[in-house]
Image (cartoon, grey):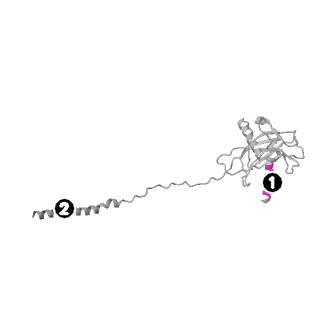
Amino acid sequence: MKVYRKILFVCLLAAVMAVVIPFTANASAIIDYSMSGTISITMLTPDLNEPIPGMGFEMFRVGDIDQTEPSLTYVPGGEFVAAGVSFSDISTASGSRLVAEQLADYADSNDIAGAMYITDTNGRVQVESLTLGLFLVVPNDFDSVSPYENMSPFLVSVPITSIDGASWEYVVSIFPKLETKPTEPTTQPTTAEPTTKPEELPQTGVLRWPIPLLAVSGVLLFSIGWAGIYIKRKKHD
């Protein structure tokens, strides 16, 4: 397993170099323009354990090799001559990504169709007998149920330099990196607590306190009345 991981790491490193480095790299050997190229794309799950079949890619040949230059240099070619992009900055990852996005937008706006490929049961697409040049690969948008993020378009150079820079490689193997969609946090719906008015206490003091007072007053008035009657009777007698 350790050996397998080491080999896979080297393959991934070579894939990164294939997309970024060889645009301005020099090799001591001369490019053999009679050769045809091959692009191999392998899609694996992020943990590098399982192949991903059924993934689609659209491929365009967007650049020709400028044979007047001593290093590997590209100029826009085919239906992309009028795209208005410059390949001078594609030796950097950010420059390569920007140009790939511009070319993909140009193809979409001008209804330029590329060649369609779908990964097999091994998660692999292999395109052979390619004319040497610069290629744009546009991954198909993944549907909403896919666990992976959509991939950005990318550029592939055919040929590329070998790792030691001493020769040219005409078979380019790419292992694009997939990103898993972030898991959305599951939040429990918050239930608003009912707003209840505090129970009003009966105002017993207000309702009942006059009763004793009235009772006392009645007795007092009753007594005063009887006293008056008694005095009148005494005077009459």
Q: Most extreme residue toward the front, as rendered?
A: 235
Q: Name the residue under label 1.
A: 10
Q: In this view, does 154 lie above or below 231?
A: above
Q: Judge by depth and name the residue closer to the eye, 90 or 148.
A: 90
In magenta stretch: residue 54: no
Check disc 1 and report its element: helix, strand or loop.
helix
Whole-percent x and y of residue 16?
A: 79, 49
In the image, is 236 to the left or to the right of 180? left
To which quarter of the image does residue 212 belong? bottom left
Distance between the alpha carbons at the discs numbered 1 and 2: 121 Å
Task: Tell me what residue is drawn at x 71 percent, y 38 percent.
Answer: 108
Residue 224 percent across, percent down from the top left: 20, 63
Residue identifier under label 2? 225
Q: Is the magenta stretch mostly helix, strand or loop?
A: helix
Above or below, 6 relative to 18: below
Total count of labels: 2
In depth, the one of 70 and 11 nearer the eye is 70
Q: Which residue is drawn at 17% across and 64% down?
A: 227
214 or 91: nearer the viewer = 214
Q: In which quarter of the image is the N terminus?
A: bottom right
Label 2, residues with CA under 10 Å away: few <14, some 14-19, many ≥20: few
Q: Report the span colored magenta.
A: 3-18
Image quadrant in which you'd find residue 59:
top right
**For this view, does 186 lie left or right of residue 7?**
left
Tell us which disc is closer to us: 1 or 2.
2
Q: Is mark 2 on a helix, strand or loop?
A: helix
Image coordinates of residue 173 in percent, x first then y, are 80, 48
- Amino acid type at circle 2 is Gly
Label whose residue precedes the other's in the sequence (1 or 2): 1
| Residue type, numbered disc 1 | Val
